[in-house]
Image: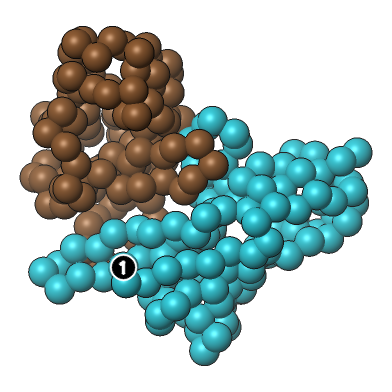
Chain colours: A brown, B cyan
């Protein structure tokens, strides 16, 4: 299995809602990532988990809360988002963190719209 | 900080034509990755280049790494409509403290007309 899966595919939420994005991989990868991608821009790193521990937080607002329950799962909890948070949210995984030559495999993304 | 510059920004070609996309780094490249993205979808990993002079191929797509020039090129031979999409190059930024992150170029939007 060389796939990263993400659910839901699309999500529409109000500014007062609480929702979660889910990501799963069964490749035995020990590093998992959240990226945010706005239209016509490249993905921007948000969070990195290595061995289920948060190793990088790219100064992301606290209304985004990541969670890594186990080595295969990664969640992104959303609360009190703003319309400008609307974007494609991508999950990725790689064998390890902290070394070069470490290709990342991406999921299909969740298209988030905040009203 | 390291930056990746891709050229051209967009490309429209006739089916069957060859094309080249370039990715230039402002700093030494340790690993260079090429991804393809269909509009609104996830990134598909194409290939990773590790060493200067390295060349890899996948079907009709070939990528090379010129370490001295801090540049990589992606070449598509006999393009097909299925090659259309956004091509992104990525590079590892290594930090002391034992972590790295992947940065991307702005992408090249390719359209292939029948």
Q: Which residue is mark 1?
A: B93
Question: Where residue A36 sits in the image (x, y, percent)?
Answer: 35, 38
What is the x, y in percent for residue A80?
18, 19
Q: Quadrant of the C terminus of chain B?
A: top right
Q: Position of residue A76 (x, y in %)?
A: 21, 28
Task: Name the residue located 43 percent from the left edge and 23 percent from the top edge.
Answer: A111
* Quarter of the rendering containing residue B91: bottom left
Residue at 18%, 23% in the rendered image: A77
In the displayed structure image, the side of residue B58 where residue B42 appears, left or right: left
Residue B57 placement: quadrant: bottom right
Q: What is the chain identity of the residue bearing mark 1?
A: B
Q: Which element carries disc 1, helix, strand or loop?
A: strand
**Crowding at mark 1 (Cα within 10 Å: few <14, some 14-19, many 20+):** many
Picture coordinates of residue A53 (x, y %)? 8, 45
* Quadrant housing the N terminus of chain B: bottom left
- Can you say whether B68 is above or below B110 in the image? below
Report the front residue among B4 and A114: A114
In the picture as drawn, the residue positioned furthest to the bottom comes out as B68
Question: What residue is at 80 percent from the left and 39 percent from the top?
Answer: B81
Q: Residue at x 35, y 58 (%)?
A: B102
**Relative height, residue A68 to residue B21 (above, below):** above
Residue B71 in view in this figure? yes
- For the question of whether residue A3 can be seen, the reply is no
User: Is the residue B70 above or below the residue A8 in the image?
Assistant: below
**So how many labels did they put on this image?**
1
The image quadrant of residue A3 is top left
């Amino acid at each position: 299995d060389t796939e990263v899966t993400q659910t839901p595919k699309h999500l529409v939420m109000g500014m007062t809602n609480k929702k979660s994005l889910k990501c799963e991989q069964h490749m035995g990868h020990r590093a998992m990532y959240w990226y945010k991608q706005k239209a016509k821009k490249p993905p921007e790193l948000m969070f990195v988990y290595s061995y289920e521990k948060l190793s990088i937080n790219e100064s992301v607002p606290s209304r985004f809360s990541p969670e890594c329950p186990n080595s295969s799962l990664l969640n992104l909890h959303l609360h009190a988002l703003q319309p400008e948070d609307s974007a494609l949210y991508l999950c990725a995984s790689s064998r390890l963190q902290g070394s070069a030559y470490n290709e990342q495999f991406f999921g299909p993304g969740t298209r988030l719209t905040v009203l | 900080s390291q930056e990746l510059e891709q050229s051209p920004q967009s490309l429209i070609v006739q089916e069957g034509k060859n094309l080249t996309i370039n990715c230039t780094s402002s700093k030494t490249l340790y690993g260079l990755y090429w991804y393809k993205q269909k509009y609104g979808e996830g990134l598909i990993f194409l290939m990773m280049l590790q060493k200067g002079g390295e060349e890899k191929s996948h079907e009709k797509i070939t990528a090379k790494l010129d370490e001295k020039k801090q540049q990589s090129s992606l070449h598509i031979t006999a393009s097909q409509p299925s090659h259309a999409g956004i091509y992104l190059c990525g590079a590892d930024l290594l930090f002391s403290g034992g972590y790295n992150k992947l940065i991307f170029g702005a992408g090249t939007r390719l359209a292939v007309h029948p």
